[in-house]
Amino acid sequence: MLLLRDRWGIAAWVVPTQFSSYHDDDRLEKFFYPHQVSYIEHWIDLAQNNGGELPPTLQHSGDWGCMQPGPTNCGPVEYSQFFYTTALGLQEDCAKRLGKSADAARYGELLKAAAQLYITKYFRNATGCFGNCSDISQIFGLTLAMNHGLLSPEEQSRAWSQALSWFGDNGKYQGRFGGGIVSFKLLYPLLDAFGMSDLGLKQQLYTDKPPSLGYWIAQGGTTLFEYWGNAEFTTPNLLNSYNHIMFGEPSLHN
């Protein structure tokens, strides 16, 4: 497999799954299944040699395109474990669809253990904080917790309040969300779940400055850009693509 890390690595599961779902055709899933098994077993070995957690050194460059300041916000230490747990869930689902019941049972048990470890290690009940309590950490943690029923409604509410303290109307970023390609696609199912879809629309109607799809449109954009600020980036080595699908790829919410 060429896709060796974090968000790119997850494509080993997301691409066949999305293709098969869209076309109602499981041939791609069947073809890639042995490769998925080899890949996930490699991740499982790494995790089992690291206390059940995928080593954080595999996180590479974090939440790509993130505008929030600092690498610990855009690439929190639990980043790799989020992708490992997500991959186990996708692997279990694929095994079920293909009738591989023994595999499904194995990956389901590993998924439960990985998800519980994530909550035990990174969630602080008293404050509702995941990891470093950044908006990215809160979105990752809430996504896993709500997918697997690991928090009570009260705990979910505290964790969501911490997320809103960043991008809510009265938050640090005053109603704007500048997460990268991973957290951006995970945010909208959460806004939906908490009855705040209107906030998601509001965030994308700003035209004065990034982050916002409206800002891109105000610049004359007719495609998706690679970065929220894009033309404002001045680092010569950055690839400022004006036709980049990353912010439009399918959700990892499963």
Image: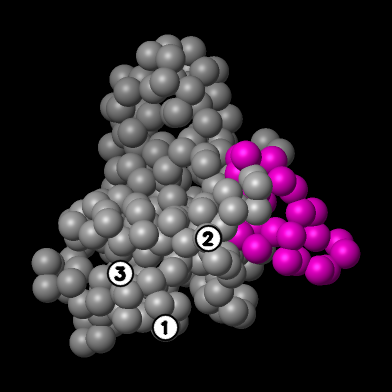
| Mark nearer the viewer, 2 or 3 | 2
Task: Judge the density around disc 1: few (<14), some (14-19), many (≥20) Cα neighbours within 10 Å.
Answer: few
> Residue tagged by mark 3?
119
In this image, 5 relative to 202: left or right?
Answer: right
- Which residue is pictured at 58% across the width and 49% down the height? 217
Q: Please name the residue shown 65% across and 47% down the image.
A: 220
Residue annotated with mark 1: 172
In the image, residue 180 lies at what x, y percent?
Answer: 55, 60
Question: Is residue 138 something one can see in this rendering?
Answer: yes
User: Is-magenta flag for residue 243?
Assistant: yes
Query: Please, what is the three-letter code of the amino acid marked with disc 1?
Result: Lys
Q: What residue type is labelled 3?
A: Ile
Q: How crowded is mark 2: few (under 14 residues within 10 Å), some or many (20 or more)?
A: some
Instruction: Specify the segment rendered in magenta.
Output: 222-245
User: Label 2 belongs to which residue?
Assistant: 207
Position above or below: 37 against 47: above
At which x and y percent is residue 155?
17, 73
Image position, residue 70 (x, y; %): 61, 80
